[in-house]
Amino acid sequence: MAKARLSSNGMINFPAKLRKKLDLKPGDEVSFVESAKGILIVPIKNILDATNPDNYDIVVEMVKEIRQERNTEKW
């Protein structure tokens, strides 16, 4: 299990072992998804990988959140 400490301004350092495993680079975006099991951190560039049947509920929630954010954005 990897863990990180929350800074006083709400930032965390993403553990290097997980960054390498997920091929995350500086500037990549992640999504925070609340679920019954806790908060999931999902790399946005890998959202299509999450569409297997085991993760269907998570993907549905992520899509709902993304749509809601887009609807509230001001252009």
Image: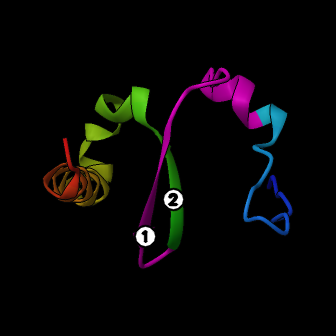
Q: Residue at x 27, y 39 (%)?
A: 52
Quadrant where the C terminus is found in the figure = top left
Residue 60 lies in quadrant: bottom left
Q: Position of residue 43 (x, y in %)?
A: 49, 37
Q: Position of residue 58 (x, y in %)?
A: 31, 57
Residue at 77% across, 54% down: 12
Q: Amino acid at mark 1?
A: Glu
Q: Which residues are magenta?
A: 18-37
Is 44 one of the magenta-colored residues?
no
- The reply, left or right, for residue 12 in relation to residue 5 is left
**How many numbered dots are placed on residues in this image?**
2
Taking 33 as reference, is 58 left or right?
A: left
Please tell me which residue lies in front, 4 or 2. Answer: 4
Per the image, label 1 sits on a secondary structure element best described as: strand
Residue at screen point 65% across, 20% down: 25
Q: Quadrant where the N terminus lies? A: bottom right
Determine the residue located farthest toward the bottom in the rendered image. Answer: 36
Q: Which residue is mark 2?
A: 40
Q: Earlier in the sequence, mark 2 or mark 1?
A: 1
Q: Amino acid at mark 2?
A: Leu
Q: Which mark is residue 34?
A: 1
